[in-house]
Amino acid sequence: MSHSAYGRIWAEAQGALEDLLVEELPAEPPRPCRDRLLVFQTLASCYVRYLQILRSLEAVYDQIVHPQKRRTVRHVLDGVMGRLLELKGEMVELEFSEFHYYDDILQDLKLTPEDLEVPVPQYFVREKARVLKDRERILGQILASAGPLGQEMKAPAPAMSLDEAVRVVQVCERARQGRLRASFMREIRQQEERERLAKTRGASTLDPHEAATRIQKVWLGYSQRKKTKKERLEEMIFLGMLPPPQQQQPTPTQLRARQAEGERRLRQEEHEAEYQDALVSMKEAVRAREGPDIRETLQEQIRQWFIECRDATGKFPDFPDPEEGGSAAIFAQKTPEQVAAELAAKEEEREKKKKDKGKKGKKSGKKGKEKKKDKKGKAKGMKSKADTEEDEEGWKMAPSNFLPTVAEGSKTYEEVWRGRDERQNLVQRFDAQLVMEEKRGEVEEEVRMQVDELMRQELKNLKLAVDREKGKKKKKGKKGKKKKKKGKRSGKKKKKKDRDLTADRSIESLFEELVHEGLLIRPMDVRLSDYIGEYSYLGTTLRQADIEPMPSLSDVRQLIALYGVLPLGSQAVHERAPLLKALLLAGPAGVGKKMLVHALCTETGANLFNLSPGNLAGKFPGKSGLQMMLHMVFKVARQLQPSVVWIGDAEKTFYKKVPKAEKEMEPKRLKKDLPKILKSIRPEDRVLVVGTSRRPFDADLKPFCKVFRKILLIPRPDYASRLVLWRHLVRERGGQLTGAMDPSCLAKVTDGFTQGHILQAVRAVLSERRVQQLSRKPLSAQEFIAPLARLDPVYKEEEETFKGWYAKTPLGKKRAKAAKASEEEGEAGKGKGKGKGKKGKKKK
């Protein structure tokens, strides 16, 4: 695609964004809404539309070449990602469920379920590719230096005597000679049979025309059958009844498109380097050329302001502090009288605050007595106010931290880039005029700071010369204030100080020790898209029938992208989005919990720390050792963020009662210290604690849910997900889908089996030897039955146990309470309708 094509995509995304901003930022605040269904439709519609804008902006940011345009797109992209997270949070609070379904909205907007996939911005990893390569190299060196520790040693082959070796060679040689003699004798028999048949047949007496007719008949039948079979296959593929043929290699068009994308990324780096050099050179040029003139102009303006204030008020004004903007506050389109009045008002407010501190205690006592007297008299008036408040109760959109960012980026696009003539910039290099304007403002601000210091000193000298006594008093007052401020600051710093147990050690040494101890591990190279699952097409229908559907694997994949990938990948999003410190993935064994943790690290380039109870056994013993370990892990995690701290079998950390077999392992070591560690995680720290649990009902629920505030229940795959999974895994292992290999039949038979079970069966059947035999012996569905029969599926009783446990979590309780309240409201409405009907009959 060309530069203009991506420009059009950007323009369309900005147009859709402007329409959304008009709806979300109306001139008058909207009234509260009580209709929960209408509120959810509004939120869901905004969510889906923002998601489409995110997909467009991500594609534009990945391929656009202009460095200044990329900064504008990135600014809006971060705002849209954050707004998406805010809308998701609003829907969770409204529906008391992590999973939502948008079937009707997809129909209205003419979208497909694939459009609901949350895109993972590629710049998360691409912009720090060098850092990741260096980290991978260091990790490899540390693991190599550790040697075979932790690696399984291969058992040496048993020794063999000379006689045994000779006997084995003799057996093999005799077998080879026997096979060779058998094949030779078979060829002799076949030759004798051919000679015997030739003698008995004799010469052919068939007419040549009849022979030609028979040959034509056979050939035409064969060609027609082949043509019909091909047409039928194409029709079945078109209808979706059969999968398309597997393409081993990409087409030339696909190769050219990939090559163009790679060239664009190289050009991005070149233009970015040019832009960075231009920022430095142009700033120096502006400072050298325009700096002296700016300095003189500012000094003249500030001196003129001194004189005007002196003429208007009879005294020299106070120069604004740097915190108030310095001389920038003077020239904010205000007259000298207004500036002097503002400064005087600020001084009066400071003095009043000091005087009112002592009077607050007396006034509060008097007010308490007056309130007690007036309680009875105001009771009736309060009722009427309460009625009006009840009328205004309802849902209101919470204030957003990202809408101002989105609006600012949209304004920048409107003012700078929309309609900009770029016919002379076909290569899409940086715009020198915009750089000059930006650097002129920076130079002016720097010069202003220097001029402010000089003019403050000049103003002091003027005041000393004219008003010496007043100048002395003000100096004393300022000194006292400064001392007080210093005292306050020092007090705040003391509170924030934490004891650093490894102050004398470098991050590199801590990193190396954690790798040696097996606490910092290398994540597997898997992507979030490798977690295969299909969209749930019955979600909305089941919810309308008051049946809570089990989430699909596609929904789980979307939530991992929302709650894990987007905040960890972007610092701007993590700092202002709703803070998520810990996430729990609960589900039966084999549903892909561990794979999702590794995919989360791969997509964001995060470090992976393993604090599973089994991995901590025997490491850093004692209370002091545990504190040192946690300090090291989270110190390195903060310094080398983003980081994921994985706690496998998280239920063991919160056991109700530790089994005897696991007492030596001390699985509950982290139970007390983990909540304290989570409290220390701030919005600036891109650190996420992820727990995985296959038996969450074994844990003590209250402390478990206190640590893991966000819980995702991962179910076994449904029919659609199993069908897609069978097709993908068979092709990935080198198999071919033929008529005898019916994946829909296997998907039906494997109801209750997890992804892990299906993967084991595919690996057991499609061995290297079996793949080599596929040309002679096509794959059939019956071959997978025997490996599946040896595995235990997830029974309904276990699935109901998971559902019952999730219903006891805080979000599950809220949903059950809301469902009960809606049922009671429905019954009350029916009762009122029956009562009205009876009254009407009596009147007749």
Image (tube, helix red, strand yellow):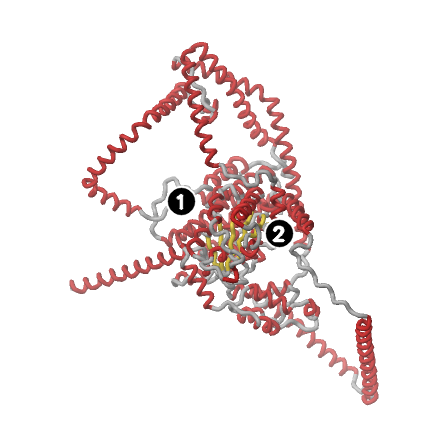
Q: Secondary structure at mark 1?
A: loop
* Residue 729, x across and y down, in percent: 61, 64
Q: Quadrant for the C terminus, please.
A: bottom left
Residue found at x 50% / y 65%: 718
Residue found at x 62% / y 26%: 284
**Residue 398 has which mark?**
1
Above or below 300: residue 35: below
Q: CA distance from mark 2 to mark 1?
A: 40 Å
Q: Where, by quadrant of the figure, is residue 232 drawn?
A: bottom right
Q: Nearer the viewer, residue 629 or 576?
A: 629
Q: Between disc 2 and disc 1, whose residue precedes?
A: 1
**Residue 522 has which mark?**
2
Q: Nearer the viewer, residue 271 or 815?
A: 815
* Residue 369, x across and y down, in percent: 22, 35
Above or below 457: residue 726: below
Are there few (<14), some (14-19), or many (20+) residues within 10 Å of tag 1? Answer: few
Q: Is residue 75 left or right of residue 275?
A: left
* Residue 643, x across and y down, in percent: 56, 47
Q: Where, by quadrant of the figure, is residue 376 drawn?
A: top left
Residue found at x 54% / y 27%: 441
Q: Is residue 552 visible?
A: no
Task: Name the amino acid type tagged 1.
Answer: Ala
Q: Nearer the viewer, residue 273 or 45?
A: 273
Outermost residue on the left side: it is 843
Q: Is residue 206 visible?
A: yes
Task: Name the amino acid type tagged 2.
Answer: Arg
Say which of marks 2 and 1 sits in front: 2
